[in-house]
Amino acid sequence: MNKEEKRFGEILKVAAEHNASDIHIRSDEKPYCRVNGKLKSIEVGIFTSEDVHELAKVFIKDEAVKARLTSIREYDGSYELPGVARVRFNLMRYQGKYGFVCRIVKTKIPTISELNLPVVLEKLAQTERGIVLVTGATGCGKSSSLAAMIGYINANDHIHIITIEDPVEYLHPSLKARLTQREVGIDTDSFVTGMKFSLREDPDVILIGEMRDAETFTTALKAAETGHLVFATVHTADALSTIGRLLGMFPPEEQGNARLRFAENLSAIISQRLLPRADKDGMIPAVEILINGPGIRECLLGKEDERAMMKYMEAGKGQNGSQSFDQHLVDLLEDGLITREVAAKSSRSEGNFLKKLRFEID
């Protein structure tokens, strides 16, 4: 272990101990970590350009990439400090300098309960076939939620799970299930290629790191149609924007067929945001869950206005596990987990939310 790897290890330990989500290392600056959504400096001295360059040599395992290090403008990868944590890193070039942003991925697989996620996610993890989408902004915990659901399946079912990730984040041991984790750029050329060939590898469950284009989505639909359970992430804020994004990937003349296949194969859309806890001890997820059913299917097919989805989603609370963000915000507020101010600001309409809250309290 060279000097810079040892130094980064010390930073990673400190960051992990404080439940930081990210580490920022830039040339000629002090390192920073993100704790409870805020960037805070770590007092371990400045990283020079040479220090960052040496750290890049540690992080990047591909010798061909190392050989052209000075010409790289951006690069994604992963690094693990055994017993502490893994990181998903992005090497970037800015103003002629280099820097890293590292997302911390703990080595222990989190459970659905530990992440304070709705228990209905366990039921969704037991679905035999269909598509389950986990959506939200960068840093909202999508990867952790997926890891928890895959971990639940792994602990309970004797099946084959294939993941296609960029890069691989949580490393799952094979428990009752057999796990095959493949990394884009190392084990397969792309999400599309990995997805296509996974159908020949006797999978029961397939996880796609990100649904990026129509071809990946089409292959996911094919997998669901042939009896597989498919998990994937989408960078969208909520269920309605997710549906719009996915269908918008197709040209107008193909959208009718895409709607039909999506309506028949969607199991659920789980959208989440991380909010500061009322006790200021970390973050807690606010989760919107759309579970497909007769009313939702009619909306997806265009037979009913898509805006009616919110009505069906909220009507499903306490029945099939569906819930809107605002409904979950009320639950979190009533349980004392978030403040009234955070709940109101995180709602779809602060004014309507406060009116609804006053009505429910009365």
Image (cartoon, grey):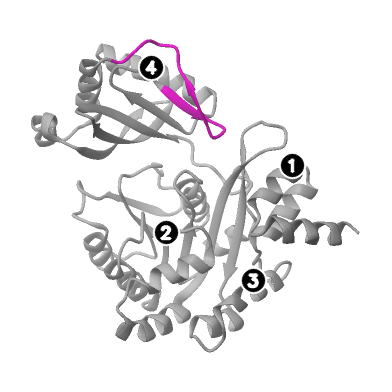
The residue at the point 56 percent across, 45 percent down is 111
How far is the residue under mark 4 from the one under mark 1? 33 Å
Which label was assigned to residue 313? 3
Q: Find disc 4 in the rendering and name its residue.
A: 30
Q: Which is closer to the viewer, label 3 or label 1?
A: 1
The residue at the point 15 percent across, 36 percent down is 72
Q: Crowdedness of circle 2 by 10 Å Cα count: few (<14), some, many (20+)?
A: many
Callout 4: SS: loop
Q: Magenta part of the protein: which range?
A: 32-47
How far is the residue under mark 2 from the one under mark 4? 33 Å
Of callouts 2 and 1, which one flags the residue occurring earlier in the amino acid sequence?
2
How far is the residue under mark 3 from the one under mark 2? 19 Å
Q: Crowdedness of circle 1 by 10 Å Cα count: few (<14), some, many (20+)?
A: some
- Going by the numbered disc 3, the residue's amino acid type is Met
In magenta segment, residue 45:
yes
- Going by the numbered disc 1, the residue's amino acid type is Thr
Asked if 39 appears above or below 187 in the picture, the reply is: above
Callout 3: SS: helix
Q: Position of residue 208 (x, y in %)?
A: 35, 58
Can residue 126 be seen in the rendering of this structure? no
Question: Considering depth in this image, is 86 or 217 the residue closer to the camera?
Answer: 217
Left or right? Give the position of 66 relative to 88: left
Q: Which is closer to the viewer, label 3 or label 4?
A: 4
Left or right? Give the position of 297 relative to 51: right
Q: Which is closer to the viewer, label 2 or label 4?
A: 4
In magenta segment, residue 158:
no
Of callouts 3 and 4, which one flags the residue occurring earlier in the amino acid sequence?
4
Of callouts 3 and 1, which one flags the residue occurring earlier in the amino acid sequence?
3
Which label was assigned to residue 339? 1
Left or right? Give the position of 42 relative to 202: right
Q: Find disc 2 in the rendering and name its residue.
A: 234
